[in-house]
Amino acid sequence: MSTLRHDDPHSLRHFAISQSAPGHWLPWGRFPDAVRTGWHQVTAAHGEENIFDYFSTHLDEASSFTESMGNLSRASALDIAAVLDTKGVTLALDIGGAGGDVILAMMKANPELDGGVFDLPHIVPVAAEAAKAKGLEGRFTTVGGDFFDSVPAADLYILKYILHDWDDASCVRILRNCRASLANGGRIAVVDHLVGEVGEPGLAPLMDMNMLGMTGGRERQITEFDFLFTAAGLRRVKVSTAGAFAVIEAEHTTLTSSIQL
Ligand SMILES: C[S@@+](CC[C@H](N)C(=O)[O-])C[C@H]1O[C@@H](n2cnc3c(N)ncnc32)[C@H](O)[C@@H]1O
């Protein structure tokens, strides 16, 4: 029960609140239709193109969802910080970074590192507050925007639980925008679950179902990430494990891809 308290270090309070709020449970109530059509049920349930459009007009639920991401991220932020080498990195940006738990853990572990969160304009104030509460505001920036338009320049991007929200064409658009602003010699770190064989238990298949009903995205295998990287002009250079997550690093490639998405 203590995990439902807000002051428990392993609190899942906001996760429980946000998953049982109408934004989530109404599309989930149509899960059989998601299976039949292969597409998310947010439009059928809420009349919105995607769940983030729904949140933009339901700010209480948006705030609870952002906190719920923090509940999940806090558990793995230190593991992610431990496997991501930030030597020589001037600025690391957490793209779609919500409340900033991952980048703030990285900054805490690496006192030289400047970091920031890029997210939708109504979300980034939460990250700014979190940085202030940790005394890290002097090295921290927030930028509000749309990653389908562009992202600010940096030499390390972290995309945690971002690509799993989107179909392949959208993922490639996000990755191409990151590539376009990535400093020479910079890296993109995708943090997502890796799915195994069908029938293999774990969090990944459950989250895969959540993505089917809620977003039109999915959890992927490593070869599916490679396909996205290649289509975006990137190449995978490293894979590490951080708790339940894979940290998949990619960098520029000069090879041109013939993949059209
Ligand atoms: C599943 S959450 C992941 C949050 C965080 N990275 C984590 O793992 O805890 C997806 C994030 O992407 C952000 N987002 C969605 N659409 C976006 C867009 N078009 N541009 C920028 N951020 C967006 C959401 O506001 C949300 O914070």
Image (cartoon, rainbow, N blue to C red):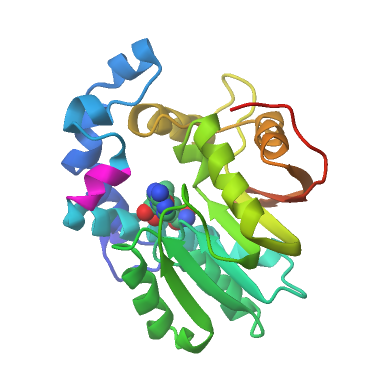
Question: Looking at the picture, how far across and down is residue 46, in whole percent?
Answer: 18, 33
Picture residue at 64% right of the left edge, 79% below the top: 113
- Label the magenta part by its dominant secondary structure: helix
Quadrant of the frame with the N terminus: bottom left
When asked about the image quadrant of residue 189, the answer is bottom right
> Can residue 187 be found in the magenta stretch?
no
Provide the residue span drawn in magenta.
52-57
> Can residue 56 be found in the magenta stretch?
yes
When asked about the image quadrant of residue 107, the answer is bottom right
Work out which residue is located at the far top of the displayed protein and give it.
36
Q: Up-down: is 79 above or below 40?
A: below
Q: How many marks?
A: 0
Left or right: residue 160 compared with residue 71: right
* Residue 75 visible within the image: yes
Picture residue at 71% right of the left edge, 58% below the top: 187
When asked about the image quadrant of residue 236, the answer is top right
Using the image as rendered, state which of residue 27 and residue 166 is in the foreground.
166
Q: Up-down: is 40 above or below 36?
A: below
Q: Up-down: is 156 above or below 23?
A: below
Quadrant of the frame with the C terminus: top right
Question: Looking at the picture, how far across and down is residue 206, in whole percent?
Answer: 45, 32
Using the image as rendered, state which of residue 92 and residue 256 is in the foreground.
256
Question: Looking at the picture, how far across and down is residue 117, in whole percent?
Answer: 47, 67
* Residue 244 visible within the image: no
Picture residue at 74% right of the left edge, 67% below the top: 85
Using the image as rendered, state which of residue 158 and residue 144 is in the foreground.
144
Using the image as rendered, state which of residue 126 and residue 68 is in the foreground.
126
Picture residue at 50% right of the left edge, 36% below the top: 170
